[in-house]
């Protein structure tokens, strides 16, 4: 049975400018302590918003199903599912898309949805400023010092040399003060302008807290034409001013690191006995001030009858070898034993499912992200280690990755 979006209702009263619309929808959600997500897809201009009318209904134990019949909503999945960092799926009880700003998708017979309509119709001079964003119930994670990170890289390289793992992606958290008057919604807008090719997101949910990000990595998507896509993204170098990405030269280390991720994706298709996939690349792509190597994979689901491919691939892919390592379980065990902090939702995945229409879903890896805490932000970044990794270089790479999202704190 298909689950259509709720009915379309006109925005009550005069339609304000787009930022005020977002501000008002967020104010309602946060004042009512409801989960809410705002996002902007790569290469598009328009923000979208999904609001759930019950915090409990967002708790889910499973990765979402990527089929047209599955509920519409926004997935927010941790790196490792746990009681501290539960897998969330925000049902789209209210959905708004800046493409049609005068419309809201909601069920007006629901009393909470009609409360929203009444709220939007009133004066907004007394709305809270700053907004009461959800805060995580978890303490600020341990932030790894440079010495500790060097040791982590050395331990990772030793684990590779001993054959315990082939590749592992170590990561760390870093604390940064919030600038005076920091406004997360304005920061979301700044990320959208700065990173037009990224998936820009702002998610705020009870328990999980508030996360902002600009991800370069598709985990699994099915587009309007029924094409399933995923990508192998790895290898990093700074984009030198004035240099062309296609002229980038890659070291053996990055070529191998990325090839492992591509091979892992191929092994997932093999497990599903699917041969009809297109593979393009690897080629150099730009992500903010960084370059990566990327191989794109596509399957046309109108030609290859595999209706559960998206769901099956999602379950096989997460966490990919671009954020965990290879072999998957050995790398995850290594990280649990040595990384020394809780990644929470960093390197999990997030994105719309069956939005804006049934059959269209776009999930991204939660990279280049931060979590809001009172007066400070916690930023996250990782680096793929191989046998040739150098601790100093890997530290510098995390610094570069942190500055993608860190740019909005300056
Ligand atoms: C783990 C991260 O990036 C991944 C994606 C692209 C390149 C990566 C790398 O070069 O190590 C990582 O695999 C991160 O940004 O925190």
Image: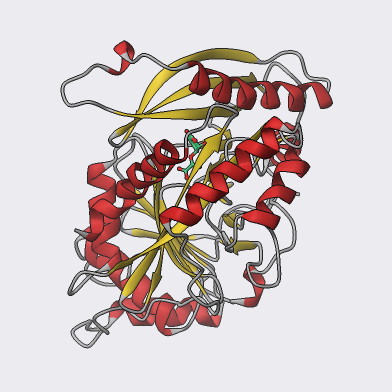
Q: Is residue 2 above or below residue 57?
A: above
Question: Percent x, y for residue 249?
Answer: 36, 13
Image position of 337 (left or right of 111) = right
Q: Nearer the viewer, residue 34 or 220?
A: 220
Q: Residue at x 45, y 77 (%)?
A: 134
Q: Residue at x 51, y 81 (%)?
A: 112
Coloration of the structure image: secondary structure
Question: Percent x, y for residue 384?
Answer: 54, 36
Q: Is residue 227 above or below residue 18?
A: above
Q: Residue at x 30, y 57 (%)?
A: 188
Task: Find residue 199 and report its image quarter.
Answer: top left
In this view of the protein, can residue 284 be seen by the observer?
yes
If the image is split into quadrants, where does the C terminus sit?
A: bottom left
Task: Find residue 52 and report its image quarter.
Answer: bottom right
Q: Nearer the viewer, residue 58 or 355?
A: 58
Report the number of numbered marks.
0
Q: Nearer the viewer, residue 125 or 349?
A: 349
Q: Nearer the viewer, residue 296 or 368?
A: 368
Question: Percent x, y for residue 49?
Answer: 42, 59
Image position of 250 (left or right of 248) = right
Task: Find residue 184 and report its image quarter.
Answer: bottom left
Question: Percent x, y for residue 167?
Answer: 64, 33
Q: Residue at x 74, y 62 (%)?
A: 61
């Amino acid at each position: 049975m298909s689950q259509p979006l709720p009915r379309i209702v006109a925005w009550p009263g005069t339609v304000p400018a787009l930022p005020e619309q977002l501000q008002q929808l967020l104010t309602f959600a946060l004042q009512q302590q409801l989960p809410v997500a705002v996002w902007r897809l790569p290469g598009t201009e328009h923000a979208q918003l999904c609001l759930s009318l019950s915090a409990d209904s967002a708790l889910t134990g499973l990765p979402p199903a990527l089929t047209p019949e599955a509920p519409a909503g926004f997935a927010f999945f941790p790196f490792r599912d746990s009681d501290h960092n539960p897998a969330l799926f925000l049902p789209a009880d209210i959905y708004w898309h800046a493409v049609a700003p005068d419309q809201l998708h909601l069920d007006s017979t629901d009393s909470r949805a009609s409360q929203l309509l009444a709220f939007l119709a009133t004066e907004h001079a007394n709305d809270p400023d700053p907004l009461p964003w959800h805060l995580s119930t978890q303490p600020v994670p341990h932030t790894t010092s440079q010495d500790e990170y060097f040791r982590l890289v050395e331990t990772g390289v030793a684990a590779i040399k001993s054959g315990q793992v082939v590749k592992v992606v170590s990561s760390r958290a870093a604390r940064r003060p919030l600038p005076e008057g920091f406004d997360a919604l304005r920061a979301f807008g700044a990320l959208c302008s700065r990173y037009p090719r990224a998936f820009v997101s702002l998610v705020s949910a009870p328990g999980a807290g508030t996360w902002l990000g600009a991800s370069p990595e598709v985990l699994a998507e099915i587009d309007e034409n029924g094409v399933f896509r995923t990508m192998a993204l790895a290898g990093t170098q700074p984009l030198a001013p004035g240099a062309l990405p296609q002229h980038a030269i890659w070291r053996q280390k990055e070529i191998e690191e990325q090839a492992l991720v591509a091979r892992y994706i191929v092994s997932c298709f093999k497990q599903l006995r699917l041969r009809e996939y297109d593979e393009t690349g690897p080629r150099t792509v730009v992500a903010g001030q960084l370059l990566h190597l990327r191989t794109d994979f596509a399957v046309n689901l109108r030609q290859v009858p595999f209706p559960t491919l998206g769901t099956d691939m999602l379950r096989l892919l997460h966490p990919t070898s671009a954020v965990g390592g290879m072999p998957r379980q050995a790398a995850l065990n290594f990280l649990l034993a040595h990384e020394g902090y809780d990644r929470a939702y960093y390197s999990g995945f997030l994105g719309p499912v069956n939005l804006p229409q049934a059959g269209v879903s776009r999930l991204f890896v939660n990279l280049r992200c931060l979590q809001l805490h009172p007066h400070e932000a916690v930023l996250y970044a990782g680096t793929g280690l191989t046998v040739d990794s150098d601790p100093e270089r890997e530290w510098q790479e995390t610094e570069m990755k942190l500055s993608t999202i860190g740019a909005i704190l300056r």
